[in-house]
Image (cartoon, rainbow, N blue to C red):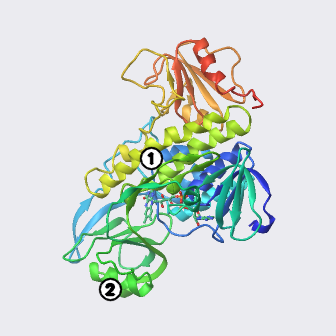
């Protein structure tokens, strides 16, 4: 563990917060050779199973970041919901719409990994790549000028960086210091208690649901994959501070289920929150970017918070890398807010609808449909069609024996030449070329896939492609 006092005085990117957002961004930047430092106020990673549902799109991102095997080994499928009444099992309830697993989406359904474990896995990948996390450093303020950012700490010397990323959670100090507002609503005025517990007397094959009764809120007890813990989630209907002690959790569980208080043998972590849906008014101010919960807070109901946060990191990582390596102008960074803010707004709306029972956990919550068709980075040069368009996620296929998710893995772009000649030159460090026959849903043509797996450009002509790639000087530093 790095001591805060020994921090470097200057880094290219300072990431504030070692939650899933900060760690995912740290991993992405480390593999791009960017000098980044993650600073975390805690003495270690934060505990708690919180965001335990990894959506299929996040699994694809984790594949690219090199943590998929560890994530698969650490987790499991969601169990079927079991509804209880008066100590009897009365109904089974599927928490998610059925999902197909196929070549297009190899990870069909959400995969359960407690958030603390996901963070550990990202942290160890960061270590493996030589990235740095510094614990025990609480950021208190930030100032910026034309050349960089100065980040202040509660103790120790300030750190200077070319860019800073606020991945410091829903109560972001940096967002407040920058005066960026958060607009939104309380989704549910009732607090929710969440606790990681050990419980006897319940099977681990079901997510146990105890519907609301009389003046009590709901209780749900989910076995946490890869552990012996159960996650207890309980809606509280009064405004008094929840009792997070073992005794308090025992009383709550016993009052709302057939379990005896002593069946709860341990509370390993507990917290409470009020579900809110809110979006930061801006995701960027000068050289500072907001990402993850610092930029948007969701109701946990749709399982979108952590996943949307990882998508932010993934969108920002390659852009920071390209600008810092001199391969793209700094204006590329403006597309982070342009692309991610509308997307986060959509995911927020969806989370709130799921919370209110107005939408299912289904196709949209899997995040495979996320795209950037309207982005200024997207160029579709083919005649309009109903199929795959530039801006869409590049779906997996096997082309001439090459599985696209394997070809995409790494910090490069990928050019697909389907039923048409690939431009001369072949593979470079910046662009990998996959050539093959026309392939649905791509069809025929040239398709340039961004480092984050979205179609940046689609067309038929080499000259059109060359014009697009000039914007990025792929592999040829501009020195700007
Ligand atoms: C009960 C519950 C269930 C949830 N379920 C899901 C789910 O199923 N699926 C899902 O996708 N999401 C879920 N979420 C949401 C998910 O937990 C968050 O979206 C996720 O943690 C956001 O990650 P983050 O890295 O942006 O922020 P955080 O995880 O909050 O991390 C921020 C980090 O910054 C550090 N920090 C804060 N301030 C400072 C400072 N001044 N200086 C230095 N460090 C600082 C904090 O200590 C923390 O480690 C759930 C949340 C809760 C509460």
> Disc 2 versus disc 1: distance between alpha carbons?
42 Å
Q: Give the labeled residue for mark 2.
A: 260
In the displayed structure, 236 sits above or below 7; it is: below
* Nearest the eye: 119 or 383: 383
User: Residue at coordinates 35% horizontally, 86% vertically from top-left?
Assistant: 261
Q: Is the distance from the Cβ of mark 2 to the nearest ligand 1 atom less than 8 Å?
A: no
Q: Image quadrant for the N terminus? A: bottom right
Which label was assigned to residue 209? none
User: Residue at coordinates 58% horizontally, 51% vertically from top-left?
Assistant: 69
**Residue 111 in view (yes/no):** no
* Nearest the eye: 452 or 263: 452
Q: Is residue 331 left or right of residue 72?
A: right
User: Residue at coordinates 78% horizontally, 62% vertically from top-left?
Assistant: 7
Q: Position of residue 249 (x, y in %)?
A: 39, 81
In the displayed structure, 100 sits above or below 475; it is: below
**Residue 375 in view (yes/no):** yes
- Frontmost of labels 2 and 1 is 1
Q: Position of residue 277 (x, y in %)?
A: 39, 56
Q: Position of residue 437 (x, y in %)?
A: 52, 17
Classify mark 1: residues with Cα within 10 Å, few (<14), some (14-19) or many (20+).
many
Q: Is residue 468 left or right of residue 81?
A: right
| Snapshot quadrant of residue 411 | top right
Question: Could you say whether the residue bearing mark 2 is in a helix, strand or loop?
Answer: loop
* Nearest the eye: 162 or 198: 162
Which label was assigned to residue 344? 1
């Amino acid at each position: 563990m790095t001591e805060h006092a020994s921090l470097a005085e200057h880094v290219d990117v300072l990431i504030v917060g070692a939650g899933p957002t900060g760690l995912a961004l740290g991993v992405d930047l480390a593999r791009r050779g960017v000098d980044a430092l993650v600073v975390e106020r805690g003495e270690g990673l934060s505990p708690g199973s919180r965001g335990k549902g990894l959506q299929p799109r996040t699994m694809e991102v984790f594949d690219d970041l090199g943590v998929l095997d560890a994530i698969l080994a650490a987790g499991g499928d969601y169990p079927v919901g079991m509804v209880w009444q008066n100590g009897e099992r009365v109904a089974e309830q599927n928490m998610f719409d059925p999902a197909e697993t196929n070549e297009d989406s190899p990870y069909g359904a959400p995969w359960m990994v407690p958030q603390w474990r996901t963070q550990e896995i990202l942290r160890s990948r960061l270590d493996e790549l030589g990235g740095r996390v510094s614990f025990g450093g609480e950021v208190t303020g930030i100032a910026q000028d034309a050349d960089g950012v100065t980040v202040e700490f509660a103790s120790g010397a300030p750190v200077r960086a070319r860019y800073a990323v606020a991945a410091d959670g829903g109560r972001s100090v940096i967002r407040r210091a920058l005066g960026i507002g958060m607009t939104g609503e309380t989704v549910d005025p009732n607090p929710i208690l969440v606790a990681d517990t050990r419980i006897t007397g319940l099977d681990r094959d079901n997510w146990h649901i105890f519907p609301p009764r009389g003046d009590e809120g709901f209780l749900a007890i989910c076995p946490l994959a890869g552990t012996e813990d159960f996650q207890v989630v309980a809606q509280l209907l009064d405004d008094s501070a929840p009792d997070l002690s073992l005794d308090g959790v025992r009383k709550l569980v016993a009052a709302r289920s057939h379990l005896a208080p002593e069946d709860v043998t341990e509370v390993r972590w507990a917290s409470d929150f009020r579900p809110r849906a809110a979006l930061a008014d801006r995701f960027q101010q000068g050289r500072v970017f907001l990402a993850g919960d610092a930029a948007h807070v969701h109701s946990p109901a749709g399982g979108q918070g952590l996943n949307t946060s990882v998508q932010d990191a993934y969108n920002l990582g390659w852009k920071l890398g390209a600008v810092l390596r001199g391969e793209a102008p700094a204006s590329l960074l403006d597309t982070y807010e342009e692309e991610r803010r509308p997307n986060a707004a959509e995911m927020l709306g969806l989370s709130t609808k799921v919370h209110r029972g107005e939408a299912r956990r289904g196709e949209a919550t899997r995040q495979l449909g996320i795209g950037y068709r309207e982005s200024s980075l997207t160029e579709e040069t083919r005649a309009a069609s109903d199929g795959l368009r530039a801006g869409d996620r590049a779906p997996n296929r096997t082309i001439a024996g090459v599985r696209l998710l394997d070809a995409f893995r790494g910090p490069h772009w990928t050019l697909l030449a389907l039923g048409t000649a690939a431009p001369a030159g072949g593979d470079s460090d910046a662009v990998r070329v996959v050539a093959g026959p026309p392939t649905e849903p791509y069809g025929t043509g040239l398709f340039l896939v961004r480092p984050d797996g979205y179609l940046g450009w689609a067309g038929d002509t080499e000259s059109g492609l060359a014009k697009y790639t000039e914007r990025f000087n792929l592999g040829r530093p501009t020195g700007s």
